[in-house]
Image (cartoon, rainbow, N blue to C red):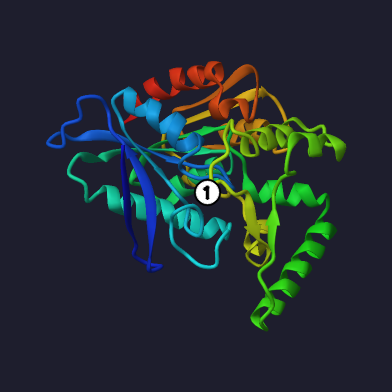
Amino acid sequence: MEHVTFRNRDMYWDIAADIYFPPNFDAARQYPTVVVAHPIGSCKEQTSGEIYSAQLAEQGFVAVAFDASFQGESGGEPRSVEDPALRVEDFRHVADYLTTLGYVDADRIGLIGMCGGGGYAVNTVMTERRYKAVATITGANYGRVLRETEGSADAVIAKLEQIAAQRTAEARGADWQVDGGLPESVEQATEMGITDVDILGATEYYKTDRGAKPNGVNKTLRSHMGVGYGWDAFHLAEELLTQPLLVIVGSVPGGFGAYRDGHEIVRRARSEKKELVVIEGWSHYDLYDKDEPVAQAMAKLTPFFTENL
């Protein structure tokens, strides 16, 4: 594995990535390459890199896990910005960089997005045609998640008013307001009366040694959240999403809605080759790192990218 940084040429900062190489890697050859996008609030050292990129490399692919701009080891200020438009642009800059590497076959680049990264990946490939195939692992439509979390259109409007007020305050010199995404522990979540499998799963993954990493902070800058509430990852999928599509979800649905989003995007995508895989008995965060569901996901991902790249 090699750690690299490269310039986000439009925004003037660097993107950090880890490149995983297959066994007996030969830089004089060209390889099919798969980019793996991390979940919202995550980083490249967690499931996108140390689990899926590492295993894809073992199967003969060059695999690339990168940190989103404003997050992890990538540049961009202020920190913890979660802006769908900028997240989609990151994928274009990653593709730019990969086309400069002699060992990457520029005509065989694929994309995987995890959780919110799955929604970003689907949205990206509609207009970024250098990605020839796309897969999602428990992928979620971030805009839908935000709106549903508020509960109603009126509540969304109220949240947008709060965001506007916070942005004005910061413009006048107030401190940034950074929102934490999760309880501090599973015990705290239980004490708060939380029973949703996704929130409990996220807390266990991100707040314990199971998945915790220094850069997986699960924090969001409130003043920059407005665009997310008006965003739809699946907009124009019926017209522009034509690449081969593989959607993997667990059968146990949770509050983040990836199960529903998976069914929706497969139904709506224009892609002639598309498949929904439901991994029975497992939930959203089980697919991040647990051996059995990850093995089942890899058993689909490897032939999918072998065939379509």
Furthest residue in direction front, as rendered: 209
Number of disc labels: 1
**Residue 257 seen from this side:** no
Pick the residue in front: 32 or 275: 32
Query: Going 38% across and 69% down the picture, which residue do you hit?
Result: 12
**Residue that badge 1 annotates:** 215
Q: Position of residue 104 (x, y in %)?
A: 23, 40
Quarter of the view holding residue 119 = top right
Q: In this rendering, is residue 130 above or below 198?
A: below
Q: Residues within 10 Å of mark 1 (few under 14, many from 20)?
A: some
**Residue 252 seen from this side:** yes
Quadrant including the C terminus: top left
Query: Going 22% across and 39% down the picture, which residue do you hit?
Result: 105
Residue 71 placement, left or right of 176: left
Mark 1 residue element: loop
Query: Going 25% across and 49% down the picture, which residue do you hit?
Result: 99
Pick the residue in front: 221 or 97: 221
Quarter of the view holding residue 244 = top left
Q: In this rendering, is residue 98 above or below 13?
A: above
